[in-house]
Amino acid sequence: MKASALRDLSNDELLQERDSLRKKLFDLRIKKGAGDSSEQPLLLRSVRRDVARAETIVKERGISE
């Protein structure tokens, strides 16, 4: 997901998107640890970077949870 798309979201939507990305990242890491090699290795990196983008925008806006 591009940063511009994340910037277009409202604060609540941004926090929900960040939480869903964190859950997806967690699930991918669990699958990788269990030895499931069917997942694309680039998907893990992509999701990790999306989480970082969302976190950056949350900090820029100064949203407190």
Image (tube, grey):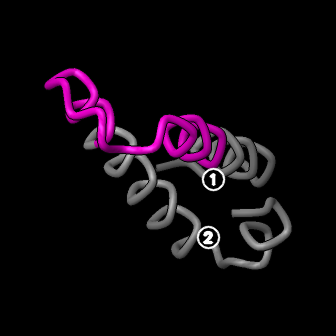
Amino acid at dot 1: Ile
| Residue ID for mark 1 | 63
Q: Is residue 19 left or right of residue 8?
A: left
Q: Is residue 64 left or right of residue 55?
A: left
Image height check: is 11 above or below 36? below
Q: Quadrant of the N terminus?
A: bottom right
Q: Which mark is residue 25?
A: none
Numbered disc total: 2
| Residue ID for mark 2 | 11
Residue in view at x 45 percent, y 43 percent: 40
Q: Quadrant of residue 56?
A: top right
- Give the CA distance from mark 1 to mark 2: 7 Å
Secondary structure at badge 1 equals: loop
Residue 8 percent across, percent down from the top left: 78, 78
Q: Which residues are magenta?
A: 28-50
Residue in view at x 39 percent, y 60 percent: 20
Residue in the foreground of this view, choosing between 63 and 45:
45
Residue in view at x 55 percent, y 48 percent: 64
- Magenta span has 49? yes
- Magenta span has 27? no
Secondary structure at badge 2 equals: helix
